[in-house]
Image (tube, helix red, strand yellow):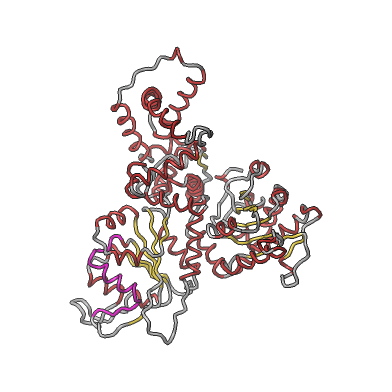
Amino acid sequence: MTLAKVSLMPWIPHVMILDDDPRVLESLVPGFVQELGRGLSQSREIAGLLRRGAAPDDARGPVRVKVSAHGFESSRVESYRYRAPFEVHLHLVRERGGSFELARRLLNQQTFAAVVSDQRFSDDAGGQRAGQYFVAEAARVHPEVQGLLYSAYPRPDDFPSDRFIRKGAGGSGGADDLAEQVVRAVERHLAQPAARAFAQEIGDRGLIYQSESFGAVVAQLFDLAQLIGSADVPSGSRMRRPLPCLLIDGESGTGKRGLAELFHAASDRRSAPLVVASCSELTNETLLRSILFGHKRGAFTDAREDRPGLVSATGKGVLLLDDVHRLPPACSAILHSFLEDGEYGRLGEEEIRRRAECAVVLTVETGPWRERRQSGELPVAFLARVERLLVAVPPLRDRPEDIEAQARWLTRTLSAELGVDLELSDEAVARLQTLTFQESNSRELRNVLERAIYRHYREADQLEWAQVEPFASDGERTARPLAASVASASPSRPPSSASQNDWQRRLRTLAAKILAKGTDLDPEEARTVTDTLFDERFPAAWDAVQSSRHWQSDQPPLPLPLWEDLWRCFAVSWLGGPSPAEKDLGIPANTLRQWINDRESR
């Protein structure tokens, strides 16, 4: 079954199984994984969220489970093939000495529904009850996570019997029981209002994803919703209390407003409204104070009656200030004061101070926001307040697996609206993954596919790249400068093919093909650029690169992937940080920051 045939529900629950014996973890593949997939698909509660709107044939098969190994290498796990798109992610984690460092890191990176641990680890980590202690810790730090013990040892007296699974002889049995208990744990996870509302909202907003980087954003939002999303306001205290404030930073079309709605759904403020104010409409201080805080009759010329303002209307809900980067500089002081102490006054009644009960979510577009920060027009105190809790959304071009998932989802959804069953060809998906999507990310992808589908839906049951390409002009705009810059910098001369062996000719042809596919050059231009690179540019750099990989004379050279990571660290350091490195490396500063944060947390 291809991806295009599946109506994908984007909520992806994660499940973790910990043990200190990799053989136990390996024994779960593929038997337990298959049982888990079948069990999840048979649970009406879970399958209803995972496969809402799926065709009958799609909904009957097992849930697709992706398996990852952490802390050990396993050929069995590596050879396991799941069908894309995956709907559940299973993490098999080997913890040496019971430190649980890997497990704690993973819990902070993704949204986990269940954690399964062996009971006993090494003596220096709590001995016979280390696994039980970790399960308790996970539930304390992440209350939505359901904990299970899977052990060959007797159940502790103080541990619930319905959450304990006894391993079979040799530690390899009980897979069916384990799968059933994990399914029940995921059901308990979904029974919690915050988790269920969160999963439902992901689908309602169409936040389709398969990448771990966007999954980390989703997990971060859920954690922040639990941390600062409480609607309880301390009573009997007049202390200055800053408003809960979250900043979502991303390029246009990355779904920032949908993420704000996701935050609202996951917090216990979901029963109160989510109120949206577009900062592009708040063109001066008077208008900002009137719309946000309200006004008294006669406060200005057209104030013919009292108005409460959006802050009052929000109550204990969430106030979304969309596109804060468009707010005039003079308004930043007013907004900063409001966020700093949560107090405000209606326009025309400054003698009365009111206390806001809402939480505030701000969204900014990465490029304009960075320009305003670098220009110095925004006060440092204001930036320190609004950027205290920051969620950076990676652009779509850095998430090729999400481009595929969204493209196939959109093709099926849009064609269904026209009463046809249209698929997207593999070539079209591959070419879409090479586009930069600099203008509006997911919105731009939707526009490209929408135009192609409306134009060609009567012609065939598969949409080819040739039909999509005329509407994807971005590839044409980005490809031409590369040919001009390389060819003009150093005039190419046709290499002599007589001295090349078969491998050299094949690799040069392959490089030209890769270049043409990645830049949309025509084959002849790609061949010209490849000859220039292979004959003049790359040979000049070869000795320097090889020399830098040999860091000690008596040691083997650094592996190339490791060398590439070190080079990126050096480049960002040499250029002074992610922002100044953005232009030279051709990588957005937010992506570089995310890459650095990911490597630091590993």
What kind of secondary structure does the magenta stretch mostly adopt?
helix
Is any part of residue 329 visible from this angle?
A: yes
User: Which residue corresponds to the image point at 30% horizontal and 70% vertical from the top-left?
Assistant: 336
Residue 27: percent from left, percent from top: 73, 49
Q: Up-down: is 67 above or below 140? A: above
User: Which residue corresponds to the image point at 35% horizontal and 39% vertical from the top-left?
Assistant: 473
Q: Quadrant of residue 9?
A: bottom right
Q: Residue furthest right?
A: 169
Residue 579: percent from left, percent from top: 33, 50
Q: Up-down: is 406 above or below 137? A: above
Q: Residue furthest front?
A: 554
* The magenta segment: 325-347
User: Which residue corresponds to the image point at 50% horizontal and 53% vertical from the top-left?
Assistant: 208
Magenta region includes residue 346: yes
Is 41 or 536 nearer to us in this picture? Answer: 536
Is 57 or 67 nearer to us in this picture? Answer: 67
Q: Quadrant of residue 104?
A: bottom right
User: Which residue corresponds to the image point at 50% horizontal and 65% vertical from the top-left?
Assistant: 223
Residue 544: percent from left, percent from top: 40, 31
Q: Is residue 136 left or right of residue 499?
A: right
> Quadrant where the N terminus lies?
top right
